[in-house]
Image (cartoon, rainbow, N blue to C red):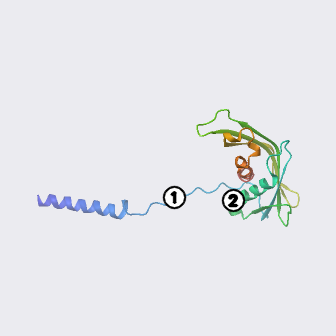
Amino acid sequence: MARMIGKKLVTLACAAGILACGACFLPPLPQHQPPPPAILIDLQGIQSIHVEATNISPSRHLDPDDLAGEAARAINAQSGKAGVSAHAGKEQGDADAVLQITVVNEDVELNPQVTPRGSRGANFYIKDSATLTRRNGVVLWRETEVRNLIFREISEAAGGEVWKDPAQMNGLDSVLGYKLVFRMFHVR
């Protein structure tokens, strides 16, 4: 009987040791973030990109200067290890490349149903064209008349005047700039 109790105590001590040293008291394993997608265009020799935007849509709701600024921020956020920075403004300065964005068309489709919170969905359709060109005139990337869908939830108080309400427009150019730059860097 004493022998049986001894074996049980040894087993219990081993189990406690295993739990104490390994299973319970080790720090959690680090969470590994997946690496960002690879940049698929050749940015060799480019350290700075000047971003320009124009709006030639019939309605001209989006401010081109705001869109250029948001696209420049998106480049700075997404360029990662490429070492590329971007800026927007009237002067190109000594930029190695220029990203020219043209808003071709702007449209919105309102969901007819109002939610209990007093809002409704709105699908913004913005068609743009863009070209990234080196200082020497070589085109690195181009897309023509891409239709972007951007969903926003808008207040019922805005009614059909969503384009005229700055609170409803807040961030629309940011989403458009981010989508465009993502396609430029990461999609073939």
Left or right side of 19 for 173: right
* Residue ranking furthest to the bottom: 94
What amino acid does circle 1 point to? Gln
If the image is split into quadrants, where does the N terminus sit?
bottom left
Q: Position of residue 79 (x, y in %)?
A: 71, 59
Describe the element under mark 1 as helix, strand or loop: loop
Query: On residue 77, which mark appears?
Result: 2
User: How much space separates mark 2 and mark 1, taking CA atoms?
Assistant: 22 Å
Secondary structure state at the residue bearing disc 2? helix
Q: Nearer the viewer, residue 134 or 14?
A: 134
- Binning the other alpha carbons within 10 Å of mark 2 as few (below 14), some (14 to 19) or many (20 upward) gives some
In this view, the residue in front, 36 or 162, is 162
Q: Residue furthest top?
A: 112
Q: Are marks 2 and 1 in contact (CB under 8 Å)?
A: no
- Residue hosting label 1: 31
Up the image or down, 69 lies above or below 117; here it is: below
Lateral position of residue 13 relative to residue 88, left or right: left
